[in-house]
Image (tube, rainbow, N blue to C red):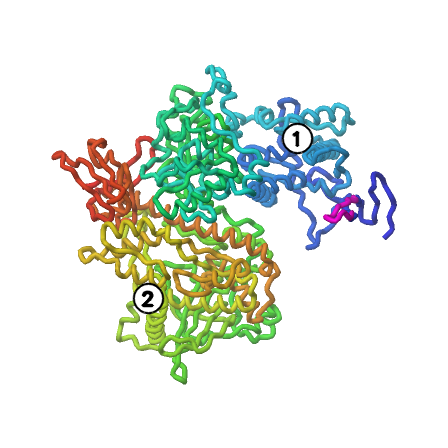
Amino acid sequence: MSSTTVANGRKRLSQGLTVTQKVFVTSRNGNATKIVREHYLRNDIPCLSKACDKCSKLVVPDASNKLPVFILSESPQDLKADNIGKHYIVLDTNIILQSIDLLENESCFFDVIVPQIVLDEVRNKSYPIYTRLRTLCRDSENNSTKRFIVFHNEFNENTFIERIDDESINDRNDRAIRKTSSWYAKHLKEYGINIVLLSNDRLNREKSKLETSTDDEDNTYITKSLMQYIDLLPNADLIKDLVPNFDTFNTTAAKGETLLAKEFTFEDYYSTSRIMGGLKNGSLFQGNIQISEFNFLEGSINLPNFKKPVLIVGSKNLNRAFNSDQVVVELLPESQWKAPSSIVLDAEHYDVNDNPDNDDEEDDGILNPNKNQDAQNMLSDKQRRLLAQDAILAQKSNKNHPTAKVVAITRRSWRQYVGQIAPNSVDKQVGGTQNVFVILMDKCLPKIRIRTRRANELLNKRIVISVDSWPADHKYPLGHFVRDLGDVESSEAETEALLLEHDVEYRPFSRKVLDCLPEEGHNWKAPTNINDPQEQAKDPLLKNRQDLRDKLICSIDPPGCVDIDDALHAKRLPNGNWEVGVHIADVTHFVKPGTALDAEGASRGTSVYLVDKRIDMLPMLLGTDLCSLKPYVDRFAFSVIWELDDNAEIIDVKFTKSVIRSREAFSYEQAQLRIDDKNQTDELTKGMRALLELSVKLKQKRLDAGALNLASPEVKVHMDSETSDPNEVEIKKLLATNSLVEEFMLLANISVARKIFDAFPQTAMLRRHASPPSTNFAILNEMLQKRKNLSISLESSKALADSLDRCIDPKDPYFNTLIRIMSTRCMMAAQYFYSGAYQYSDFRHYGLAVDIYTHFTSPIRRFCDVIAHRQLAGAIGYEPLALMHRDKNKMEMICKNINKKHRNAQFAGRASIEYYVGQVMRNNECTETGYVIKVLNNGIVVLVPKFGVEGLIRIENLTSDPSSSAYDEIEFKLSFMHGESNQTRDIYVFDKVEVQVRSVVDPVTGKRKAELLLK
């Protein structure tokens, strides 16, 4: 290729410029290796402004033969203030990291340029914020108000800069941002559009002003801080609440407060070098902290070699850690080790009279339980290593747990939070800006202090806030208001709140995603004849499908189900065995790897089922129509077909893509009635009866192998058909047909797991369930031993299952179910993984008692199943497996996301039920039977099976004289003076009690909740 030297080591190629860099790397043996890197520059990267008529002549099609879309408006916002005029905004990295909520707001920041170097920095510092920024840019094509573009300054020959000698990377990147701003200013000067660089970096702003004062007048651009720019906007007063809050005390000096005068302070975090050294020599430990659901001032962290969690007790030792933060901890001396707290303490009722303008420390022993005990700071690293060994040994012999303090936070779990303003923190006489507390929905988190001018307006509203910082001299974290969801208790606000709180993506699918759907829409039909040459020309894979439309197939689902994933059939074979088929919706026919639709499904991970709505993983066209195995229509499916003998032993199994026609869609109850009706003698009904008989044998085999039969307090909320208001709660009833479907879905999942693991031993998508450590059952076993002279065995899943069968109380049939519910909470969570991540022995699913397992049977609502379908298609030679599902790193990212999304979906579903149960009880105060499942120092926790709810009854609601109570942790007993007779009443764990259930509004928080009162 011919080339000519241009300048500064750049060469002019036929397609543009290249920059050559030479780096010498020294190896361990002292040899130097020269590495040459070439960075290609282009002159055809457009500004993407509709006002520009020059760039449109330069652009060339991309690899997909598409031209770039010009996004930025030809008539951007015109600010008269400060002579800014019509302008585009260029963002510095700190603006995005600190103010992504503000950038997403529809009432400001309309035409925005994100330099590529800024995008890269954001990705390196916060991937969640990077994702939100990419979404803003991606959606700009179809957004009439928000127009964000990424400008590839690092590949444009006019904006690329090289790092100069002794220049830090950060300074070089700042200079690149200024160069981009300067180029845009000159480029768009003739169109009357100015450039505003927004940066909260004072030095960067000063250098900008210095450069623009010496540059050519055509290159001049405007530089502002975020607050300076916001002040110029016509709607500044409405959006100032969204500006990040990094130190409210800067604005409260008028009250006579200064930072020097403040008494409250947390301990400073350790330096990076001290942390690295401590982690290496074993004196410090790293892990994720979990805050107790009953005491927000007590956390725990699971560490390798420690059988029990290490406790972190008190605000000072927690040292500003949030639930799920990744932290570094240091063990405290043995004299300060203690058992987990038996006291209930939540943020919403703690220090309710705190002044949001005051951060003075309260010397109550809770914030700092180790006050005046500073001996631990004098321990050497060697002594701390010995302390760690003592801690491991001590856990084997007593109830005390080692305790620790947080010395660093390596990764924050901060996100957007939902809450409401604490009414007693608002000064109703103040009409302007004031500091207020926000009580979050997540009880594991502290109050957040925000600064707002809308405090009175936002009372009794569900609001979204972001956390900005938690300085060492502030008792509470600082945040800012993001948006108002609506009135507390309104179904719309509460539903959106729980979706946000559990990180559920609920926005409509984007245009790019919808463009991936079949053009025919609802008119799409499976081919009548799969051997038709014309149809095979349209779909070359059609010839690999099997036509199963002659099979008597039906589906059995919950009533009202429209996203039908699975269907079944059974047929007696001439040799006396049974042909049994499980047919699963062929979602992967429509969802191809690497498409926008695939990326959206992978991101959402799962559908989310709430009481009043369903949040789909895939667009409704697929989920409820084209993929759904509805009756009387032809549908594509992925079929698993076994030959089973009368004992449900597998003789043979085949896998095939197919075309099916379901004969009927039954609810569980309808299917049960048809099976039980002796007058029904048609072939479809006979097949259903055969399926039921075989499923009973399959289940017995699982139970004999040690499969667990656990329980959960599941209820169903009935909605009024006209008003959509909740009007009744009932315990879910399970029929034999529920088990019928479950057993064959399990069998399909196991069979598919074996097949895809054989074909792809390193990247097969599987699901495992680890055996629980004995410590998980320690407290439950103590309760059972002390109260019922029973115990749960943990030698194997079979031993556990048998011991659960023995946990019965002849006087109370529900007791066994109660123990199964409590045992479920002691189990480890099942997780998705790729096969290369574990040894085969660790693939085991403990609860199902099988050596290998996956999820294959619900691809409409679970992305794991989509991947399993693709891998199975590759395993049987239907079509090659995409490279992304052969890559361990990509599979690890997928597994991590779907594990998180699956867990969040479960929590969101439970939260929805809890909210609607509260609404049902609003007008239905009643007395119900409950069971004591936990006894605490200052209350008891009671489960009410009828409503599937559990609640804390505080000691204040148990007796008129709380000081009379006595807690016996050995006997799991709480004693107190009860009633007017002042007789002592003893409450033990597992006691069956009568409770008054009613719905009340908390006077402190304004939240409605189910309140239980002991009768």
Q: Amino acid at mark 2?
A: Thr
Residue 728 seen by the camera: no
Q: Which residue is mark 1?
A: 197
State the CA–CA distance, disc 2 to disc 1. Answer: 65 Å
Against 695, residue 323 (above or below) is above
Query: Which residue: 44% across, 36% down?
Result: 332
Relative placement, left or right, of 215 versus 302 is right
- Name the image quarter holding residue 419: top left
User: As drawn, is 743 to the left or to the right of 16?
Assistant: left
Of the two numbered discs 2 and 1 on the same chain, state the one appearing first in sequence. 1
Quadrant of the rendered image containing residue 150: top right
Toward the bottom, the furthest residue is 575
Percent coordinates x, y for residue 918 in the rendering: 30, 43
Indicate the position of residue 123 as horizontal and vertical percent values. 61, 42
The segment highlighted magenta reads 21-32
Residue 560 lies, in percent from the top left, at 36, 58
Residue 762 image offset from top left, x and y in percent: 56, 62
Is residue 596 inside the magenta stretch? no
**Residue type of the residue flagged with mark 1:** Leu
What residue is drawn where x is 41% and y is 49%?
A: 307
Q: Secondary structure at mark 2?
A: helix
Q: Return the residue at label 2.
A: 737
Residue 401: tell me if it is visible.
yes
